[in-house]
Image: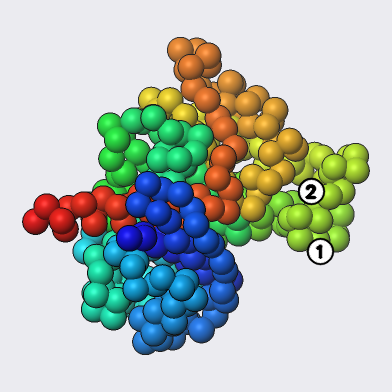
């Protein structure tokens, strides 16, 4: 038997097929654009899974979706898929595939992946942060992912750093996301130089020693460190794992993250809390999908 983990993003959807012991046997990506129309979800995913020769032996599926996901697997809304309103993804997929399906928010799936196979392995209390266009997060306390009463817990990107800071995508001011995301990197660079560059290009300039680009990453990292201090002060977690596209610039960010953290957290946390780059990188989501699917499969066997 095999287990499938799927990580849906705004551009790509990533598939992973695992042995029941958690070995990744095959992974591939497809465009997520056709999924803008929620009606195609079951057929599109079924057709993709059929690319694995032994697809008929896939016995459970865990999928991460960007947006607000209810505990019963209904996607209430998704910033990347505007036409998805109250879409019963779990029901649609389990009916089409005839196997147990579990749906989770994508940042939670990243966090679960790092906790089961990555840099937060064996931790009971930890936080995952994904930094791309926006900033997402997942919180694990006493070994359980925290959903909150509306499924909205873990919106780490909207911790307020400065109430009069830059405008955030959520319409408020001064959120972490407005300081420490790929969008923020582009904006800060534009304000400093008038150049319209992608975050990766700013990183390339910084790696070549460009002073303005280096300053951009200093600012981004420092504010991220302040946000992490707030999280650690509040939740007393032992590890914070950072993933997403911006984490690829870890060498440019790390010391500034540490500075922001050290200046704003309690002394007791300084030598005990680890702030780490994601170990699994782009695969964290599919590993998280494997982990939750295995849990739901085992439960279905018992009942
Ligand atoms: Zn915000």
In this orientation, which residue lies closer to the viewer: 60 or 66? 60
Q: Is residue 47 left or right of residue 185?
A: left
Q: Residue at x 66, y 58 (%)?
A: 183
Q: CA distance from mark 1 to mark 2?
A: 13 Å
Could you say where residue 14 lies in the image, as x and y percent from the top left? 52, 65
In this orientation, which residue lies closer to the viewer: 76 or 43? 43
Badge count: 2
Q: Is residue 155 left or right of residue 73?
A: right
Q: Residue at x 52, y 61 (%)?
A: 26
Q: Can you see residue 123? A: yes
Asked which quadrant contains residue 237, the reply is top left
> Where's the C terminus, which quadrant?
bottom left
Asked which quadrant contains residue 187, the reply is bottom right
Q: Residue at x 49, y 53 (%)?
A: 24
Q: Can you see residue 10? A: no
Looking at this rendering, what residue extends furthest in the left direction? Answer: 303
Circle 2 sits on which residue?
Answer: 203
Circle 1 sits on which residue?
Answer: 196
């Amino acid at each position: 038997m095999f287990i499938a983990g799927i990580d849906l993003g705004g551009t790509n959807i990533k598939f992973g097929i695992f042995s029941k012991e958690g070995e990744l046997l095959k992974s591939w990506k497809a465009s997520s654009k056709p999924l803008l129309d929620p009606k195609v979800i079951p057929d599109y995913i079924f057709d993709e899974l059929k690319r694995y020769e032994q697809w008929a032996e896939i016995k459970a599926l865990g999928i991460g979706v960007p947006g607000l996901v209810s505990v019963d697997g209904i996607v209430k809304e998704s910033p990347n898929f505007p036409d998805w309103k109250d879409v019963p993804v779990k029901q649609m997929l389990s009916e089409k595939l005839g196997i147990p399906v579990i749906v989770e928010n994508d940042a939670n799936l990243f966090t679960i992946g790092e906790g089961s196979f990555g840099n937060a392995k064996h931790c009971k209390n930890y936080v995952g942060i994904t930094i791309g266009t926006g900033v997402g997060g997942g919180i694990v306390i006493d070994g359980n992912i925290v959903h909150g009463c509306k499924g909205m817990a873990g919106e780490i990107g909207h911790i307020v750093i400065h109430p009069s800071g830059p405008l955030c995508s959520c319409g408020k001011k001064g959120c972490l996301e407005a300081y420490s995301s790929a969008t923020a990197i582009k904006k800060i660079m534009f304000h400093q130089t008038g150049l319209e560059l992608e975050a990766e290009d700013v990183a390339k300039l910084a790696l070549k020693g460009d002073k303005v680009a280096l300053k951009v990453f200093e600012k981004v990292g420092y504010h991220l460190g302040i946000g992490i201090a707030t999280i650690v002060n509040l939740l007393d977690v032992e590890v914070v794992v950072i993933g997403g596209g911006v984490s690829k610039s870890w060498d440019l960010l790390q010391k500034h993250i540490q500075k922001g953290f050290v200046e704003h957290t309690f002394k007791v946390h300084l030598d005990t809390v680890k702030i780490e780059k994601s170990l699994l990188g782009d695969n964290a989501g599919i590993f998280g999908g494997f982990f939750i699917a295995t849990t739901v499969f085992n439960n279905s066997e018992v009942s």
